[in-house]
Image (tube, rainbow, N blue to C red):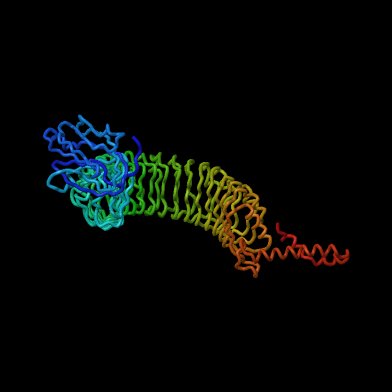
Amino acid sequence: MTQMHPFPAPVGLWVRKGNPSLLYSQTQPTRLDVQFHIHRSCSAEMQTGECWVAVLYSQHRGLRRQKDLQEGIWQLSSVNPAASNRHSHRGLSPGQLSICQVNLTSSSAWRIAGQGAGLAATEDMMERVEGRSGVSTTCPRRCSCDPAQSVQCYRATEIPREIPFTTRRLYISHSKIKQLQIADFRRMSALEELVLSCSGTESIENNTFKALSTLKSLELYKNQLQQIPTFLPSGLEILKLADNSINTLHASDFEGLMKLRVLDIRNNLIATLPPSAFSSLCNLQSLILDGNHMESVSAPLQLPRLKYLSMADNKLNSFPTNFFASFKNLQFLSLSGNFLTKVPLDLPKSLLSLKLEKNQLKTVRLRDMKHLENLSEFFLSENQLTSVDGAQLLPNLTTLELSKNQLHTMPLRLPGRLQKLDCSDNLIQRVTAQDFQGLQDLKHLFLDNNAVSTFEAGALQQCVQLSNLALEQNLLISIPLRLPDTLARLDLKGNDIQDVGEQELKDLKQLQVLNLRNNKISALDRKVLEYLPRLRHLYLDGNPWNCTCDLLRTRRALVAKGTDVRGGQCAAPAESRGESWMSSKKILQQCEENLSSMERGKEDRKKMKPNEAFSVGVNADDDYYDYELD
């Protein structure tokens, strides 16, 4: 059928028992497709003729109501001669679809026709069937509606009454809706997703969502709910109640939700975790309990299909024996931000990621974890660890984060597949080649904010894929020698480096970012830059630069390469102190004047007699030749 223009007015069929009398005004002429069908609730009355059918029509064109419904006859006045054969349908069965094309060209009112006592139709007496255009009927104030059957509302004080019947997704935020009631959603029989956030909702009437049989996702986060909504629809798959004031879980809260896959109740006031509360959730895959007040858990949870469990930022200090044993499919576990003093035992073999940051761990017995042969990510930052040894027992580990502990030495015996190692913010003083033996897959190494003063030459030579090396805020006096030629980023900010030489950088052909901020560098030879063909970002500020014309020559080389440079300020000579050596016109002018003076001197010497020229040459400052600009 021909594609029609968007149609903002009510389109479709109303069916009710009795004689309806309704009126709706619309002034925009348009052309549309309408799908008609006989409402199933009328089938019982078909033989008695008590079920009436009414259709939108133009008051100038009229609608012929067919009394003999038991014969299954529909008849519209012919408004489109080209499609008039579609306007009469005989032998139509209840529930069967028929398509009619109607050309509504009148700008006058459209009427839902009928005879009788003029009774107003109520919500439970009618059904709307949307047109082929898929466009909603009306859009409530402070809402936006789109053809995809989504409605977004804001700053509402109640659930809008005019929301289209075919709405599948409803999003309401930043409103003031203290209570939800059954009547709020009675007409929304097609609703699949409901999001009500930041609206101050305090209570929900019992059974409010029970009749929404198509609802799959319910999100009520950032409100003031004190309990889980009751009698939720059995087809629900996603339930998010984060950032409320829920303080207790009951055994009946999730009863019957056998299809629920995601449950998010983070940032509430839950203190205990009764296992019976989750007994119905046989298909739950993701459970998020972060930011509650849980101090302990009493017994294992029976959630056989759970893949993601997060209990971060609670007050947990231990777990009962075999608490995790039933999680045969668990892949992600976060216990960060608790009071754990040791790694829980009996963690499931299926784990891929384990997060234990911000606890009180002083030791990690990796031999108790060797069964975690699939573990890929291990996060131990912000604990009290003084050493880590034996991580090679985790053969598939690719990420190990140990920042903000109390490590004095590099971790020993690391796994060969490691790709990211973060040992920043510790007390490490020395880096040797032995520390990185066999780490041929390492790509990212973070050793910043330590006390490294010794970095053995070639310590990282076996790291043949290393692209990112962070050594800022240490005690290095020079750039480490024989760094891997694969480096793309090198961060040496905040050390005591005084010189940037060719030997340190000559092999770094892939380097794109070099950070030398806040060191003690005063000069930079432009020849060094020739070894860095791919350099894109160079950070040099915070150094005591001696702004000679030689440095300006380096500046021009950087500009010609298109390198983004943060050059910093001059510390010398005195007349240039505080000037930016990358952008100061004053310094550039001085160097140009020196050049001009030098060239004038050359011309004068050509005009002098040989003995005069020799006399002047003795007193000439040959350093001027070093300041020649390109």
The reply to whether residue 525 is visible in this rendering is yes
Residue 543 in the figure: left or right of residue 285: right
x and y percentages locating residue 447 in the rendered image? 50, 53
- Looking at the picture, how far across and down is residue 397, in whole percent? 44, 42
Q: Which quarter of the rendered picture does the N terminus lie within?
A: top left
Position of the C terminus by quadrant: bottom right
Task: Answer left or right for 518 relative to 190.
Answer: right
Question: Does residue 301 appear in this view?
Answer: no
Instruction: Look at the picture and state if 577 lies above or below 156.
Output: below
Q: Which picture quadrant has residue 558?
A: bottom right
Q: Residue at x 51, y 44 (%)?
A: 442
Q: Nearer the viewer, residue 329 or 77?
A: 77
Tell whether 183 sits left or right of 513: left
Residue 314 coordinates in the image, percent (x, y): 31, 54
Looking at the image, which residue sits at the far bottom? Answer: 575
Tell me if residue 57 comes above or below residue 514 in the rendering: above
- Pinpoint residue 404: horizontal percent, then vertical percent: 44, 55
Q: Nearer the viewer, residue 5 or 281?
A: 5
In the image, residue 279 sits, relative to residue 245, either above or below, namely above
Identified at 11% across, 34% down, the residue is: 48
